[in-house]
Image: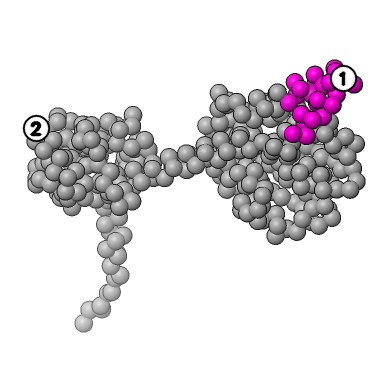
């Protein structure tokens, strides 16, 4: 009697993957490109290329992407009856037509966003799967657009966030020097105008670190005029990082925070130190005061946006948005030990360029 040989069959999923593997890579690459091309939606500059990619995925004769107005962007010869099908879908939000011409609604966050039109031999199930891919790309583009608008709104709010208390004190000091020290008064007025210009003028998303340091120098000059001997200032920056591009208004809120919450409450003179230099592939800037400090849990609340110090939370969010989760603010503090805020940015980051 012959022996019985038992062999373990290859799992079905593994067999399917092995068979599909030669075609899977180009399919995934095409799907990834389509997702990027639809970042600006169905009316963006990448819509035609996206339609071509979807057509390749489906192996269809023609593919159209229609927006809510009914305008269709085609890859391949436009189908004569497509307009009527698109109109049916836009009014009913349900699929219309049948092979060889199909129109499928595209839903984003529970709302109709457009229509996918397909002419060819692709099955209805395959068309639906690709429609889900297009929906995911549109949803991601909508989310990124919303995040960008929120960041721009936060920056506009930060630009407008000039302390009335600071403005009143600065102008009062300048006015008091008009007769006794006109040269000093004129110098401070120019610093004040420079400070307002940098805070409110329209800029791009990024500026050179040299400009940020110049802005805080003018701000500190005004604060020294207001606080007198109560404020000491130390600024040291390595020349090799002055050209590094950084998000606009990333340092001034940190210096303002150091003076308002670190130095002004003191009954003794205090010091604000600002330093910048390169560490490996990064540029590291520190803003430090020798004020009263605060409990670490209060620092966590500050970075989460609770309380009055919204400027720090704004800077932290913008840094993480531009550079990734590893590049937010670091706050080192303890009661009676002052506060140091660290900013770390790459010396070079793709997409972070000066206007």
Let me know if residue 272 appears in the view: yes
207 w.r.t. 26: above or below: above
- Label 2: how many Cα within 10 Å (few below 14, some 14–19, many 20+): few
* Residue 77: x %, y % from top left: 14, 29
Say whether disc 1 or disc 2 marks the residue closer to the N-terminus.
2
- Label 1: how many Cα within 10 Å (few below 14, some 14–19, many 20+): few
Pick out the residue farthest to the bottom.
1
193 w.r.t. 334: above or below: above
How far is the residue under mark 1 from the one under mark 2? 83 Å
Residue at 88 percent of width and 39 percent of height: 230
Viewer-proximal residue among 39 and 250: 250
Q: Does 105 lie within the magenta span?
A: no
Give the tally of numbered discs: 2
Q: What label sits on residue 109 in the rendered view?
A: none
270 left or right, relative to 62: right
Instruction: Name the residue carrying label 1.
Output: 179
| Secondary structure type for disc 1 | helix
Picture quadrant of residue 227? top right
* Residue 298: x %, y % from top left: 70, 57
Q: Quadrant of the N terminus?
A: bottom left
Q: Which residues are magenta?
A: 168-192
Residue at 31 percent of width and 48 percent of height: 108
| Secondary structure type for disc 2 | loop
108 w.r.t. 250: above or below: below
Instruction: Name the residue carrying label 2.
Output: 80
Residue at 84 percent of width and 21 percent of height: 178
Pick out the residue farthest to the top.
183
């Amino acid at each position: 009697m012959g022996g019985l040989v038992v062999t373990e069959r290859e799992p079905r999923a593994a067999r399917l993957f092995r068979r599909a593997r030669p075609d899977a890579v180009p399919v995934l690459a095409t799907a990834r490109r389509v997702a990027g091309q639809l970042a600006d939606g169905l009316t963006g500059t990448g819509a035609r290329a996206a339609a071509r990619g979807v057509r390749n995925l489906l192996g269809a004769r023609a593919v159209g992407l229609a927006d809510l107005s009914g305008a269709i962007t085609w890859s391949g010869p436009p189908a004569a009856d497509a307009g009527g099908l698109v109109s049916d879908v836009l009014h009913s939000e349900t699929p219309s037509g049948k092979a060889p011409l199909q129109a499928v609604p595209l839903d984003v966050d529970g709302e109709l966003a457009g229509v996918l039109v397909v002419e060819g031999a692709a099955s209805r199930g395959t068309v639906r799967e690709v429609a889900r891919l297009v929906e995911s790309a549109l949803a991601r583009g909508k989310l990124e657009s919303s995040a960008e608008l929120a960041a721009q709104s936060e920056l506009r709010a930060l630009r407008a966030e000039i302390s009335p208390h600071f403005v009143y004190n600065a102008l009062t000091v300048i006015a008091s020097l008009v007769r006794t020290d006109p040269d000093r008064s004129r110098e401070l007025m120019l610093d004040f105008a420079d400070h307002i210009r940098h805070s409110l003028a329209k800029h791009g998303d990024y500026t050179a670190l040299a400009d940020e340091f110049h802005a805080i120098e003018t701000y500190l000059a005004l604060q020294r005029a207001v606080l007198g001997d109560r404020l000491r200032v130390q600024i040291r920056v390595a020349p090799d990082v002055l050209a590094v591009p950084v998000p606009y208004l990333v340092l001034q809120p940190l210096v303002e925070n150091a003076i308002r919450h670190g130095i002004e409450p003191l009954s003794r003179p205090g010091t604000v130190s600002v330093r910048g230099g390169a560490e490996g592939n990064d540029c590291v800037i520190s803003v430090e005061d020798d004020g009263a400090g605060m409990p670490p849990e209060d620092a966590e609340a500050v970075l989460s946006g609770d309380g009055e110090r919204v400027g720090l939370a704004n800077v932290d969010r913008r840094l993480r948005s531009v550079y990734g989760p590893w590049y937010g603010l670091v706050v080192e503090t303890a009661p009676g030990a002052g506060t140091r805020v660290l900013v770390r940015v790459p010396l070079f980051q793709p997409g972070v360029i000066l206007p």
